[in-house]
Image (cartoon, rainbow, N blue to C red):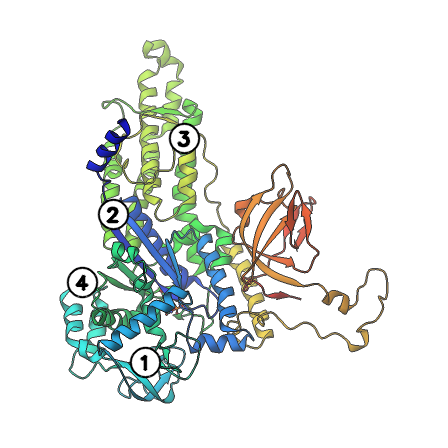
Amino acid sequence: MIMAKKLSTQNSFPPIQKPTYYITTPIYYPSGKWHLGHSYTTVCCDALARFKRMSGFDVYYLTGTDEHGQKIEERAAAAGLEPKAFVDGLVGEIKVLWKLLGISNDGFIRTTDENHKAAIQRIFTTLYEKGDIYKSKYKGRYCTPCESFWTASQLKEGDKCPDCGRDTVEAEEDCYFFRLSKYREPLLKLLTESDFLQPASRVNEMVNNFLAEEGMLEDLAVSRTSFRWGIPVPFDDGHIVYVWVDALSNYITALGYGSDDDALFQKYWPADLQMMAKEIVRFHSIIWPALLMGLGVPLPKKVYGHGWLLFSGGKMSKSVGNVVDPFILCNRYGVDAVRYYLLREISFGQDCDYATENLLTRCNTDLCNDLGNLVKRTTAMARQYFGGKVTKSAKDVGTEFDAALIEKINALHSEVSAKLEKLEISRSLETLFDLVSSANKYIDLTKPWALFKETKNEERKTKNDGGDAVEKTLNAVLYNLLEAIRVSANMLLPFIQNAPAKIFASLGLPVPDDFSAMKYGAIDTYQTTESEVLFARLDVKKELEELELLTNNEKRITNNVGGDGDKEPNAKSSPEPRTPNPESRGKERSDNNMITIDEFAKLELKTAVVTACEKVEKADKLLKLTLDVGGQMRTVVSGIAASYAPADLIGRQVVLVCNLQPAKLRGIESQGMILCAVDENDKPVIVEPGRAVPSGSTVR
Ligand code: ME8
């Protein structure tokens, strides 16, 4: 009976449905080295997804990889691999990169997923049956890197691709067309009469170049016969679905559209925000909505084309080769520093020149000087003056400087939220750090050390106020500072996660998962501990010199293979081995320390990425590592616990001896050995490549 009653009560109060929020990055081409440009979009979306989750939304954050097409087919062939094996290694790497960068994606779609392929075939068939796709003949110019056909009027001077500026080739083939021209008017209306495409500056560009006049928007070739690596048109052998139809549709197929289970699609579509850089805005603001109109599917609410991260004056890009390696930056400066730089330095929507010097300076000024020092100074004073215990004060206790600080604390959430809602990401961090600066200034104004000295003043004590009033003021000052720190750290959580977690630990509080306590006075008593150093000060000159050495080393390796190093990302990207003297082949060792080249060649050494790591129970020295060796997983037990905590190793590249006989250590089968140097204290130091190379690369 009781049970029945309970159930009926539950039924009458259904759980409150949270509003949904669906956010997407582009799906990236696994065609070369992953760089800071990819990290930029993914980190921005991550900050927004985390902000929305903490604001009470039921968020679905999607990213993934765009794996089909001629470009990938050609790159795989150049690397001597099947396309699937080629992309598997790079997809494994991007997943490790996202883990390293703390990306909180809910879904990861690969266009080689079986359910995606089946859904694309259904989408293509539906559009064909509705008459929006028809068969005809294509004759014109084709840009292979962009996988785009262009009409004569669209080409740049010299028959160059209008998107990337590279040469196009003559192409003629039977193909299927999508009736894009039919959607010119609704698209024009969409772009000019709503906020669908942002920032507004991109609207003019799309309208003027593609939509303004009748006849400007031509039907789109949506099948290819010149290569095989793609999704076949289900009813016409030999035709492959155009890679952009395949790719754009990921945003709905990832939610189950076109499958037997479309619950996620029903729940999250239409997307609230689809983010990308400006070079692919045309695909997302013209082709994508037209395809959806053809399918009768609602349109995304907002498409946002942000600017580029520029390097040496041009767009940082795999094909140009001017890329900055996020693995190196994260391993050297920490994930918080890289995320903070990307989110703070770049005025969202604009282009920005990348400079490592700016990253290092941001670290030193904002993170180390402003935030790190504020936390360090405050928690040290709390320990020294009150043994760490600081309590909320009565209203009339405090200093003349309190009101301004408290006002800023109380305004922080609404001000930062308002900016984030407008996608002013960098400005929202500016506001946040304004509070941090104000708190530092408040210390200078209130001089807690002087107040403390006063509480100790013998003369006052004999006057019989025992220093109590001053002590209360000092407590109030520290309380205000702790509140400023707490609220700032709470607001920082969508942007960076490690430092706020350490801050909450030193405040003696759990890490919040929402913004419900953003007002001043939410905590009655703090029991703090002195904070560890949050951000070490970097020697900018020394760092730049060391990074240059690393980059030169990278160039040297690249020059050795005679290319831009990202053309053959898998098997062939390591330098050629030194040519052994034929005379020495197979020769006996000349003395006891020497081995022949043939003996050395027996070692199978490969690079691997650490994807998971944990301590081995009851073994102080051992760590169990899970390694991704070019898409294949290995377990290795290694005696390096004295030098590394498990978390230090996740995402790091190591060198693995792959053909070592497996051995059981503490009941775990160790399938290889990682190479370590031994330092001056006899402790192991892992051997890492001078730059991140695809996992599974040969070491020789
Ligand atoms: O275009 N600055 O994939 P892609 C800022 N597969 N953002 C950058 C950047 C830079 N220098 N470089 C890359 C594709 N990005 C298609 C997308 S979606 C249906 C298919 C980011 O690997 C930015 O988001 O070339 C850009 O739009 C995207 O990576 C291009 O990634």
Q: Which mark is residue 438?
A: none
Q: Residues within 10 Å of mark 2 (few under 14, many from 20)?
A: some
Q: Are marks 1 and 2 in contact (CB under 8 Å)?
A: no
Q: Amino acid at mark 3?
A: Gly
Q: Earlier in the sequence, mark 3 or mark 1?
A: 1
- Asked if disc 2 is less than 8 Å from ligand 1, the answer is no
Give the side of residue 589 with respect to residue 353, left or right: right
Image marks 3 and 2: residues in contact by CB distance under 8 Å: no
Give the image location of residue 71, x and y in percent: 44, 77
Give the structural element (helix, strand or loop) at label 2. Answer: helix
Q: Nearer the viewer, residue 665 or 153?
A: 665
The residue indicated by pointer 3 is 508
**Residue 210 seen in this snapshot:** yes
Disc 1 residue type?
Pro
Q: Would you name the residue on which mark 1 appears?
A: 162
Tag 3 near tag 4, CB within 8 Å? no
Rendered residue at 25%/74% (across/down): 127
Q: CA distance from mark 3 to mark 4?
A: 44 Å
User: Are discs 1 and 4 less than 8 Å apart at CB?
Assistant: no
- Give the residue drawn at x 33%, y 28%: 479
Q: CA separation, marks 3 and 2?
A: 26 Å
Q: CA distance from mark 1 to mark 2?
A: 38 Å
- Residue beneath disc 2: 417
x and y percentages locating residue 688 in the rendered image: 60, 57
Q: Callout 3: 10 Å neighbours few (<14), some, many (20+)? A: some
Determine which of the numbered discs, if any, sits on residue 195 in the image.
Answer: 4
Circles 3 and 1 in contact, beta carbons < 8 Å: no
